[in-house]
Amino acid sequence: MPKNITIFTTNTCAYCGMVKKWLGAKGMSYEEVNLDANPERQAEAMALSGALTVPVTVVTRHDDSREVIVGYNLAKLAPAVA
Amino acid sequence: MADTTDKATARTVHDVIMIGAGPAALSAAIYTTREDVETILFERGVVGGLAAVTDWIDNYPGFSKGLEGLTFAEELRKQAERFGATIELGEVTKITNEGDVKKLETTSGDMYARAVLIATGSDYKKIGVPGEQEYYARGVHYCATCDGAFYRDKRLVVVGGGNSAVQEAIFLTRFASHIDLLVRSDHFRASEVLQHDLQKHTDKITVHFNTTTDEIVGQDGKVTKVVGTDKTKGQKVDFPTDGVFVFVGLKPNTEFLQHSDIPLDDIGFIKTNENLETPMPGVFAAGDVRSGATMQIATAAGEGATAALRIREYLDEHARQHAQKG
């Protein structure tokens, strides 16, 4: 189980909902940063992902190493949160 | 009917596995589960398919005021699950005919079913121009509801002349300061209603007919312009922009069937008979992935329901034959 999971989302993003649903089904809690409500954090999402898109999921492990998953990508999400 | 364990092989055989969980498969699942046909759906992307990433749906019957694509997808999902459908998040990579049973190789391991519905839908095509791949997700996008918010007060180019291009260009006016809509032809393929709606946004949207999109150009890792050609004059035209949204048509999600025994037409759509059955017995197709489909949510739902009824008949017939063999 990771130390922390943060997801950057927007209200109209269907893939964001899928990531949240998948994490919820795995019993994982996460912090959500809604970029519609917090547009000032868009730059942070872009800096983390290198992309102008959501969802951006940041998984922080207990050794404080981080993995950033862009989009709804179970092939990368699953091992990142394992 | 229900999943049963094959005594000879000790494998679990499901009644029906549906590949995809968009409007066609979810509609089919509502019908099959209400008839006690055990139904599993496999979805590798978003539940609801392209409908879920559509900004607004105004032409699905029964919703007089229209509704958000995301809401529509969520309601469809809840309805299917209410009657017992199970949605697995994963991918099917191969289908093999093993007689009365179909074997599906999936990201969750091998699975077996008496019947299969392929409803994998379609995805947005790429233009295929220089810069498009290089700037993907960093200036080039295919989902306005996903990425439009990053372009508040920025200039955008939208490429395409069909319903999606016009609808999503209108959606993007929520964010963008200005949109250049590049249409290759001399007219829209979009519906009259959408063309009429577009007229309400002439302050923000400029339409350029007879304009091809030739290259997406950037600097320092950011898109700066689209280079096109005005076909009427034969001249190159530059469109300064911060981002490009591409809606140039749909391609079927059938890559996993390329080397299967399920025939595809010239452009990759699945061929079926009038019962929506493929030449592989017990394997059906419905919705956008099917050759001859009309690429509408309403028709996908209708095909899903039709396929479900055919699947029910197929399973009943095979149960009868199995009982007779005793």
Image (cartoon, grey):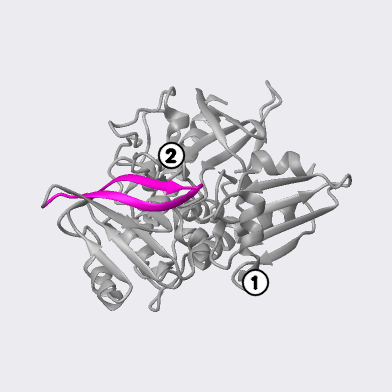
Q: Which residue is drawn at 39% across and 45% down?
A: B286
Residue B99 in view in this figure:
no
Q: Which of marks 1 and 2 is in front?
A: 1
Disc 2 residue type?
Asn
Q: Residue at x 58, y 51 (%)?
A: B36
Please tell me in which quadrant of the rendered image residue B4 appears: top right
User: Callout 1: residue from which chain?
Assistant: A
Q: Nearer the viewer, residue B86 or B178?
A: B178
Q: Which of A67 and B77 is in front in this view?
A: A67
Mark 1: secondary structure:
loop
Percent across and percent down for residue B75 are 54, 65
Mark 1: few/some/many CA within 10 Å (<14, 14-19, 20+): few
Q: Give the range drawn in magenta.
A: B212-232
Percent across and percent down for residue B238 are 28, 53
Mark 2: secondary structure:
loop
Q: Residue at x 42, y 35 (%)?
A: B254
Mark 2: few/some/many CA within 10 Å (<14, 14-19, 20+): some
Percent across and percent down for residue B39 are 58, 46
Please tell me in which quadrant of the rendered image residue B133 appears: top left
Residue position marked by numbered label 1 in the rendering: A38
Please identify the quadrant where the C terminus of chain B is shown.
top right
Measure how far apart labels 1 and 2 are at the Cα level.
35 Å
Is residue B226 a member of the stretch shown in magenta? yes
Residue position marked by numbered label 2 in the rendering: B253
